[in-house]
Amino acid sequence: MTYYSQIKGLGFYVPENIVTNADLEKLMDTSNEWILERSGIQERRFFTEGKDTVATMALEATKMALRNANLEAQDIDFIIFATLSPDFNFPGSGVLVQRALPFREIGALDVRAQCSGFIYALSIADQYIKTGMYKNILVIGSEVQSNILELSNRNRNFAVLFGDGAGAAVVQATQDSSHRILSTHLHSQGQYAEDLFLEHPGSRLKDRMSQKIIDEGKHLPFMQGQAVFKHAVVRFPEVIREALQANGYAESDLDLLVPHQANLRITKYIQQVMNMPDEKVVSNIQKYGNTTAASIPIALTEAWQEGRVRSGDLVCLAAFGSGFTWASALIRW
């Protein structure tokens, strides 16, 4: 018996706290015009302490995804949780979601592939289902990043880009070969790991955190912006075309592209290179900023809610980020 994977339900959650570019102007030497020109971001969501966590946001996204899949928590066989910002150093956030609903004592796997995390997690779910091991898998991307950003001049180039949120998908086994995940494609190039990373607190030093580390700002995320942009605009089209070619499709066959929401300039460049009109590309970075592992499931859920994802559509998910990692998934909806 041959099994395939199908996205059965989608959900997302974003915190209620909206932070505009004008709000950031009060905290650092930046401007609405500067942020818009370099990223396309107008606002983002920041979590509320005591209300939102990586796990609780994931839980709200999960509830929506389960409703849309017409499933209950006890129908889920496995949880795959993608995040760079877990609630604790350990354990991972997957088990925190597992305990929050009446799930059975199922496995929970955490994935650390940053901006590519959701597609990496989706690929893992696809493999488990195709082997017949599981029938219903919950795939989550959730991030709280606003509290690892320093809203100050020394971190301003990074701090204006990121936001908080969560997205989830229920991936289900099917024997319908005409509506399924067609293929996934995963890559990495670790020689550029330090071009986009958070160095401390890490396990390389005896003293994981010191005043010296804080004074030097090495506890803050670091990004070589030009290097990331240069690689992203190459890898995005490359991995999208890889997915299309692997399944015998041309670029013109694609109905919808859902890229990781990293930067509107990157998205527009992909459109130009691949000759794709606005209606075929999902972009919501204007509202949420870069939500890392959560960005694709949030964007995909919104597109589905808006009727932009229809049965039979050829949909491509694509991501690039820290690692460097990049990935794509091609889906016949």
Image (tube, rainbow, N blue to C red):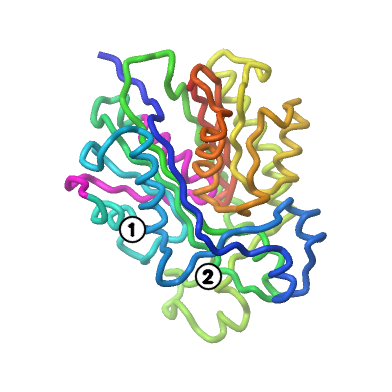
Of residues 207 and 161, the one drawn nearer to the viewer in this rendering: 161
Q: Quadrant of the N terminus?
A: top left
Q: Residue furthest left?
A: 105
Of residues 182 and 187, the one drawn nearer to the viewer in this rendering: 182
Q: Residue 247's spot in the image, x, y percent? A: 53, 16
Q: Residues within 10 Å of mark 2 (few under 14, many from 20)?
A: some
- At a point 23% along the width and 55% down the height, the residue shown is 99
Residue 329 in the figure: left or right of residue 26 = left
Residue 66 in the figure: left or right of residue 234 = left
Q: Is residue 111 above or below residue 19?
A: above
Residue 194, quarter of picture: bottom right
Q: Residues within 10 Å of mark 1 (few under 14, many from 20)?
A: many
- At a point 59% along the width and 51% down the height, the residue shown is 191
Q: Residue 276's spot in the image, x, y percent? A: 72, 27
- Circle nearer the viewer, 1 or 2: 2
Q: Is residue 204 above or below residue 213?
A: above
Q: Disc 1 residue type?
A: Gly
Residue 162 in the figure: left or right of residue 330 = right
Dot placed on the residue nearer the N-terminal end, 1 or 2: 1
Measure the alpha-carbon separation of dots 1 and 2.
Answer: 18 Å
Q: Which residue is mark 2?
A: 147
In the rendered structure, does residue 197 fall within the stretch colored magenta? no
Q: Residue 178's spot in the image, x, y percent? A: 43, 13
- At a point 72% along the width and 35% down the height, the residue shown is 270
In the rendered structure, does residue 105 fall within the stretch colored magenta? yes
Q: Which residues are magenta?
A: 102-126
- At a point 18% along the width and 45% down the height, the residue shown is 104
Residue 99 in the figure: left or right of residue 202 = left
Which secondary structure, mark 1? loop
Q: Disc 2 residue type?
A: Asn
Q: Which residue is mark 1?
A: 92
Which secondary structure, mark 2? helix
